[in-house]
Image (tube, coloured by chain):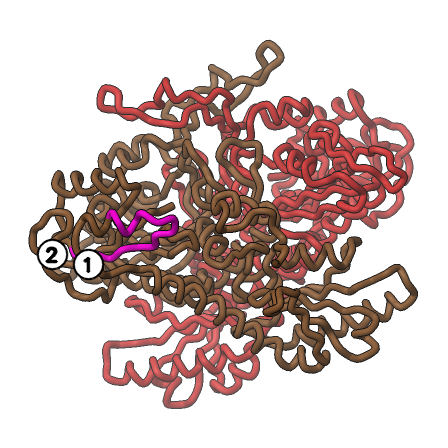
Chain colours: A red, B brown
């Protein structure tokens, strides 16, 4: 039996395993500040890779980055009731701008109370809408295509690292258009950017589709999401794209003169992904030895560990490793230089090896005296860590062969992670449930997966009733998958004729 | 006489000119949120270039990026009295975590008052120190070399875009070391990173040196800065690096077991630069036609403007421009691909030309029907906008020549901006002042520059008196320049024997 690197398995306790990966892979930690985490270098390195790759795609689709204020005056929220209803319960509010000493403690200075309290942004539609109303006068000013990378705060009572924290990092795109058709096209274009980014860069298969009415972003006309399947069968909403219609242009007065000289309201969109994606990477790709980072988003793709023994031959091993690092760095994988690290920290080689395995570096290369003598290296691929006999699969190969094959190996690891995840998702979506009893039965197991069913798309109070009923089973609607089969028969919730297929799942 | 693009000149009203550049170059604008600005795409694009280039240097010197919480509990500040004294007056304080409706208005919910108020970080020594105390146990854990890119808030009563805003963007490096010598070496290493970055990337000459005691960061043992000279002769502190000794390791209990098994306090440093640097770029390189962006940090280095006339020949002009853009993009300037934009917005060519001149794009290339016919382009270099006769210097050159020479031209523009700024700074530092009357006289003109004088390095109350006296002249000590000549004679402030040379200037 394999002795794995973590002391809890996915099978035994998925939630505890998730925390163990975050801790053992040095991704993040509790900060001591309620609901906020510290993102450590390996976790932040993955976020930097996500930023770089996604930012390139956001720019390639014509968007420019800006920066808008962290603070939003209360009056901005008062203009859009539905939006504020969605966020009022979880807003951090700044009320003072100075501290004083009182009885030996620091306290907010009562003489420095703000006339109008400020909210720490939970999302920026209101403050960006106010800017749009200044920027947009004529149809010639449209479209406005803006993005920002920022921190946002939503005061969460129950937090979980990466998945739900009071402060998190994200990008939020905001656009304004002259017509509904164009704004809807933008909404779907960015959904597709997210879908392909998740699949190609994170090796994370997702289902893209429209959310039902009850899951819409507060103020949106239509909300779309990408949903990923975690290894416990739950869904993770990994990105959303909203068609906002004229909700915010009405509230913030974003009007333009059209080609005929008439004043019209602009049509706006917004879309975002966050550090939550890292939680998805963990729960899609992690195993009982820790994280497995897809090579495209790995801060270091290849880590070289010299096996030093405080002997004179150590110098030759280090030199050999340095040469190897240089040889690897001239190659490109995925159109970028290979990121190869030489780990020279003062620690035992075995400690380093298992440290990098737990962090999920795609390839770990070990070099000892015998490797140097034979012009070899010992290669561990993180996607196939063990041989069939349960022993660690460390293959001795000629150094030249590793150099030749490294980029292909990285691409093969990226592919392998994607295929495994894709197969898992495909085999765990049931499409054969035709009545409510069947739905209940489908979610009785320990790792139930998702169910796609036909429904009649109820709305308002009728939908609320269905949602309440699902809630008792801890189930939620995820989305109406793009490209799903046509609906058949009657809605399993309302009995009315079905009009489309919708995903039902437990979710994070 | 030249009719410049801005309607206010540097000579006439420098402060108004500064605001005009920010507005006309679309760098930033007032947000409607007190003290906070919106950084627009061209301004944020410059910041992204600064981030990319400086981040490379921060990583090349062994630092890793992390992310720490935006909020810091009051109790963290209570541990370090000097530090809190420095910031308490300008802290934004979060006191509530929910809003409710009351009499039709949104108000903080009195039932959702935080037990311990949270400060929006003005700087992160305290919260990062707390993390260091968790991370560091043994000498083997040292050094810890960390950086973060983040927003910070210091509640400013009088704000000025980029130079002094309530919220600003920056990077803050934080490191912990086993010995004072090593921490001091780190402090100076990062000062040098800032100095060379400012000179090489921003084309902004600076004087690096140690700040006098009264200008130290709250809690620091030594503070160093880089100081740049603006075109009005004032100094701008453009970056600081602090040796913090054991101030924060005492407050946050950052201890390690040394090689002999004894517990020691770690020695820490911190260092930062901010969006303030963009204010420096404006005031060092701007002219009466707007901004001039050094090519290394220009979001677009070459902008191609097709001169279209709604004629059939327009299509050929656009094709010609597209080819040119592709030809330029295969070249590298400063080790990166040339950033060439084709401006196809629906606006008049002259409007676009002057828009890019005001934004300060290093090279603007105009292409009309005649250029296409002759296989030419019309080239405007932003560093030499006018010919001697006062006419716009738009040179018709063969397209192939522009392609061949573009990268050399960009490097020449970078050099030219640096040389102009370097010469201005060098000729405006007076070193011949030997008494206080001379100092007063030196600052009587309208653009007085800086004065470097010998002083006795007084301290405590004696220094305070000198600082107060300078304050009456609106003067401040900047720093003791690295590599300055030895002190001569007596201190012009105290009459005591001088020990070093220090810079005196008006400052932002």
Looking at the rendered structure, the secondary structure element under dot 2 is loop
> Where residue B397 sits in the image (x, y, percent)?
70, 78
**Chain to which the residue tagged by mark 1 belongs:** B
Does residue A213 appear left or right of residue B34 in this picture?
right
| Front-most of residues A255 and A156 | A255
Which residue has dot 1 on it?
B501
Residue at image point 30% right, 64% down: B189
Residue at image point 60% right, 53% down: B42
Q: Which corner quadrant of the image does residue A374 belong to? A: bottom left
Alpha carbon distance from label 1 to label 2: 8 Å
| Front-most of residues A449 and B6 | B6
Residue at image point 81% right, 47% down: A185
State which quarter of the image contains the N terminus of chain B: bottom right
Q: Can residue A212 be seen in this view?
A: no
Q: Mark 1 and mark 2, same subunit?
A: yes
Residues drawn in magenta: B440-454
Q: Answer yes or no: do the residues labelled 1 and 2 have beta carbons within 8 Å?
A: yes
């Amino acid at each position: 039996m394999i002795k794995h690197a973590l002391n809890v398995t996915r099978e035994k306790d998925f939630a505890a395993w998730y925390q163990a990966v975050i801790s053992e892979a040095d991704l993040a930690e509790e900060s001591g500040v309620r609901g906020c985490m510290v993102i450590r270098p390996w976790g932040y390195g993955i976020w930097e890779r996500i930023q770089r790759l996604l930012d390139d795609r956001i720019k390639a689709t014509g968007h420019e980055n800006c920066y808008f204020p962290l603070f939003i005056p209360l009056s901005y929220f008062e203009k859009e009731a539905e939006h504020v209803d969605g966020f009022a319960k979880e807003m951090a509010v700044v009320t003072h701008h100075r501290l004083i000493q009182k009885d030996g403690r620091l306290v907010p200075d009562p003489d420095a109370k703000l006339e109008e309290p400020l909210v720490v942004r939970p999302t920026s539609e209101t403050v960006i809408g106010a800017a749009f109303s200044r920027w947009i006068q004529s149809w010639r000013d449209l479209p406005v295509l803006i993005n920002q990378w920022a921190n946002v705060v939503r005061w969460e009572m129950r937090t979980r690292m990466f998945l739900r924290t009071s402060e998190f990092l994200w990008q939020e795109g905001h656009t304004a258009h002259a017509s509904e058709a164009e704004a809807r096209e933008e909404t779907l274009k960015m959904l597709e950017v997210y879908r392909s980014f998740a699949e190609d860069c994170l090796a994370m298969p997702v289902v893209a589709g429209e959310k039902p009415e009850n899951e819409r972003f507060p103020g949106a006309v239509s909300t779309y999401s990408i949903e990923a399947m975690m290894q416990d069968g739950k869904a993770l909403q990994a990105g959303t794209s909203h068609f906002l219609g004229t909700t915010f242009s009405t509230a913030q007065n974003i009007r333009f003169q059209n080609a005929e000289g008439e004043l019209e309201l602009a049509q706006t969109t917004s879309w975002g992904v966050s550090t939550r994606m890292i939680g998805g990477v963990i729960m899609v790709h992690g195993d009982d030895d820790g994280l497995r980072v897809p090579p495209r988003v790995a801060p270091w793709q290849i880590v070289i560990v010299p096996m030093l023994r405080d002997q004179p031959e150590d110098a030759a091993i280090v030199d050999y490793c340095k040469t190897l690092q240089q040889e690897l760095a001239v190659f490109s994988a995925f159109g970028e230089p290979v990121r190869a690290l030489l780990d020279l920290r003062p620690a035992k080689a075995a400690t380093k090896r298992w440290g990098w395995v737990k962090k999920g570096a795609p390839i770990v290369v070990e070099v000892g005296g015998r490797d140097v003598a034979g012009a070899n290296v010992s290669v561990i691929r993180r996607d196939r860590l063990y041989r069939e006999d349960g022993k660690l699969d460390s293959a001795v190969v000629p150094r030249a062969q590793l150099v030749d094959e490294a980029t292909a190996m990285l691409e093969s690891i990226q592919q392998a992670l994607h295929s495994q995840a894709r197969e898992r998702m495909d085999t765990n979506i049931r499409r054969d449930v035709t009545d409510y009893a069947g739905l209940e039965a489908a979610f009785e197991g320990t790792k139930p997966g998702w169910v796609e069913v036909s429904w009649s798309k109820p709305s308002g109070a009728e939908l609320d009733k269905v949602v309440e009923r699902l809630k008792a089973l801890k189930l939620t609607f995820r989305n109406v998958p793009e490209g799903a089969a046509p609906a058949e028969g009657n809605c399993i919730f309302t009995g009315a004729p079905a009009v489309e297929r919708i995903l039902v799942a437990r979710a994070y």
